[in-house]
Amino acid sequence: MSDRRRRASTEKTRPSVFWLLGAVVVPVVGLLAKIEIKGAEKLPQTGAYVLAANHHSEIDPLIVAVAVWRLGRAPRFMAKESLFHVPVLGWALRKTGMVPVARTASSAAARETLKTSRDLVRHGRGVIVYPEGTLTRDPDLWPMRGKSGAVRLAAAGDLPVIPMAQWGAQQLLPRYGKLRLWPPRRRMSVMIGDPIDLDDVRQEHATPAQLNAATTRVMDRIAAMLGEIRDLPAPAERWNPAAHGQKETGRLDS
């Protein structure tokens, strides 16, 4: 066993709801998928961070969560604020330290982003963010245009944004398709990259243009890493749903 595996972070070794969830989820995912991780050493073992990943299947959060858990960190996601008001589910989200995110941009949302960022720093927690905000609309499942939430969260607390590309979950559950349980142990690839330079937005009054440009850098890096996994060149530009008459939230009508 590597030194990295021995050095489990305190947030994982401390008893929590995650142990109960992990005891159920990790073995089940292990039956369905063989997760191969490249760049494991690039995920910080301690301290706060924002992990930005691509999103192409409804089941890929499980793959991402198990990968992060295996690397010694508790897998906390940003989730829609409305989910925190659902009975039982809301309790589970709060107990596991999931992070609420407002869909709309406002001064109140900005204050909440700052508070969330400070909480992450204070507790030394990482958070997993899907910058696309929904399943990619790209017909070939490349990362599409991202939203600036991940960058704003990182900038507010001077946190590193670490890109993650993951591929293979669509074999288990195609985008808006049906679950495929056979054959078992399909290969899933996860790649973690170096932190992305965000110096231009780590200031008190970063402009929307600067935030959008930084978000584009994040999505371009994720796309390039996914291209390495798929052994294909990533598209030069990210898919823009609005340019193709598509809604950016909700189920994609094929």
Image: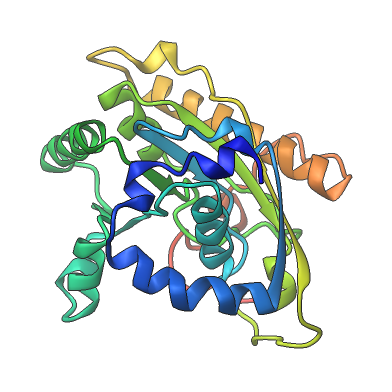
Quarter where residue 199 is shown: top left
Quarter where residue 84 is shown: bottom left
User: Can you say which quadrant of the picture contains the C terminus?
Assistant: bottom right
Image vertical order of residue 157 relative to residue 36, above or below = above
> In the depicted view, which residue is nearer to us: 204 or 95?
95
> In the depicted view, which residue is nearer to us: 228 or 220?
228
Instruction: Give left or right: position of 138 versus 69.
Output: right
> In the depicted view, which residue is nearer to us: 65 or 108?
65
Image vertical order of residue 145 relative to residue 14, above or below = above
Instruction: Give left or right: position of 7 versus 136.
Output: left
**Image color mode:** rainbow
Return the x and y of residue 193 as percentages of the image width and height.
Answer: 63, 32
Quarter where residue 227 is shown: top right
Q: Residue at x 65, y 40 (%)?
A: 2
Return the x and y of residue 188 as percentages of the image width and height.
Answer: 73, 61
Q: Is residue 252 visible?
A: no
Instruction: Give left or right: position of 27 versus 16.
Output: right
Instruction: Give left or right: position of 220 versus 103.
Output: right
Q: Residue at x 41, y 37 (%)?
A: 50
Q: Residue at x 65, y 86 (%)?
A: 179
